Image (spheres, rainbow, N blue to C red):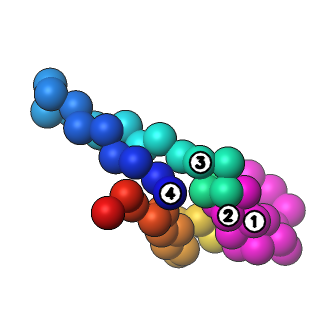
């Protein structure tokens, strides 16, 4: 499971991913961008998608 690491400076938090989390994100990325030919198409497809990470409870 992903673990959110709080940033004391008030900037963006860090998210530590497990091996399974990384595999899940890569699979989701591949599914979303499967038919894309250019970087512009990839950016557009990703902008229209949401990828969730599981958080540590």
Q: What element carries label 1?
A: helix
Residue 24: mark = 2
Label 4 vs label 1, nearer the camera? 4
Q: Tell me the tag on residue 18.
A: 3
**Is residue 40 toward the left or the right of residue 12 in the image?**
right
* Alpha carbon separation for disc pair 4 and 1: 16 Å
- Give the residues drawn in magenta, as a range: 23-41
Q: Distance between the residues labelled 1 and 3?
A: 14 Å
Q: Residue 43 carries which label?
A: none
Mark 4 is surrounded, within 10 Å at the Cα level, by few (under 14), some (14 to 19) or many (20 or more) other residues, namely some
Name the N-terminal-most of marks 4 and 2: 4
> Is most of the magenta stretch helix, strand or loop?
helix
Residue at point 37%, 58% (across, down): 56
Residues at badges 3 and 4 in contact (C-beta under 8 Å)? yes
Tag 4's secondary structure? loop
Q: Residue 34, percent across and down?
A: 83, 71
* Quadrant of the image containing the C terminus: bottom left
| Residue at the spot of label 4 | 1
Q: Nearer the viewer, residue 34 or 39?
A: 34
């Amino acid at each position: 499971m992903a673990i959110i690491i709080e940033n004391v400076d008030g900037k963006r938090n860090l998210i530590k991913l497990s091996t399974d989390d990384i595999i899940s994100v890569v699979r989701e990325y591949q599914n979303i961008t499967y038919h894309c030919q250019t970087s512009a198409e990839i950016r557009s497809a990703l902008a229209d998608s949401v990828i969730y990470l599981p958080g540590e409870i």
